[in-house]
Amino acid sequence: MDAARAAAGGARYVGAIFAGGPRLVTPAAAKAVFDRAGTATRVVVVGHEPVDDIVRSAMAAGADIVQLHGDPSPRMVLDLRERWPGGIWAALRVQPTAFDAERASALFAVADGVVLDAHVPGALGGTGVALDWRALQSPLAALRAVDEASALLVLAGGLTPENVQVGIRLLSPDVVDVSSGVESAPGIKDQARMQRFIAAARGDSAGDEQLSFAGVQ
């Protein structure tokens, strides 16, 4: 019921995870989730798989967007675009001590969305580790001022009901993406925390950012 509640609460996107971990589902299970999500845009999160396998799984799930994790290159985005008719989001995992502006610029130029997440060795995402948003303000503002940088900025990584307004205020993302920050246990969404996250992201001090819930069931 997570997907239905997320969509009813105003989520623009719902996501299913194909990239491993406690939120892993099959394409058939993802389709069942998406069928309960109303008009929300359907996102599948994938890792290191061949392009043909990604396309096959995404189509079986009825996805609208493929989200590439595992540090995808711009070339990987372009290769997928040749075979996949839907949208493509590319994850940009940010190291604690450095922001790779060149790689970020290249991803913004070819993807439909760039998902900012924290780099945690051995994990593709969903770790609950937050980024240093203040340190990212200047480089992201410079990137997004460039005409070619038309991709959506999707803020992920450690978002919770308690801090989402701060992330929105500092980085002005187009989409805020949450998974572990609204869970009571890995893979188990907490309905009260989901509602609090929605209320915080929609609050008076926040903007009109779109909501994305990943790993819903």
Image (cartoon, rainbow, N blue to C red):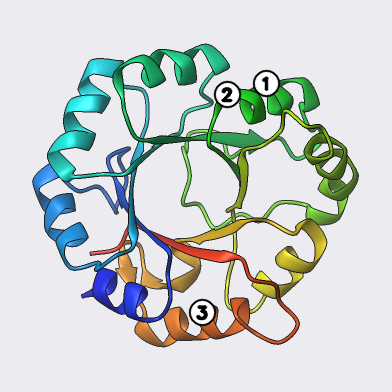
For marks 1 and 2, give the one nearer the viewer. Answer: 2
| Residue that carries the numbered disc 1 in the rendered image | 106
- Which kind of residue does numbered mark 3 sit on? Ile
* 187 vs 1: above or below: above
Which one is in front, 71 or 76?
A: 76
Nearest to N terminus: mark 2 or mark 3: 2
Q: Residue under circle 2? A: 110
Residue 201 in the image, given as x and y percentages of width and height: 60, 76
**CB under 8 Å between discs 1 and 2:** yes
Amino acid type of the residue tagged 1 in the rendering: Ala
- The N terminus lies in which quarter of the figure? bottom left
Q: Quadrant of the C terminus?
A: bottom left
The answer to whether residue 31 is left or right of residue 48 is left
Q: CA distance from mark 1 to mark 2?
A: 7 Å
Q: Earlier in the sequence, mark 1 or mark 3?
A: 1
Q: Secondary structure at mark 2?
A: helix
Compute the Cα span from label 2 to label 3: 30 Å
- Labelled pair 1, 3 in contact (Cβ < 8 Å): no
Q: Residue at x 46, y 51 (%)?
A: 126
Foreground pick, 193 / 150: 150
At label 1, counting other C-alpha atoms closer than 10 Å, the crowd grade (few under 14, some 14-19, many 20 or more) is some
Describe residue 116's horizontal placement relative to residue 18 as left or right.
Answer: right
Please give the residue where the numbered disc 3 appears in the rendered image: 198
User: On the picture, is 7 further left or further right than 152?
Assistant: left
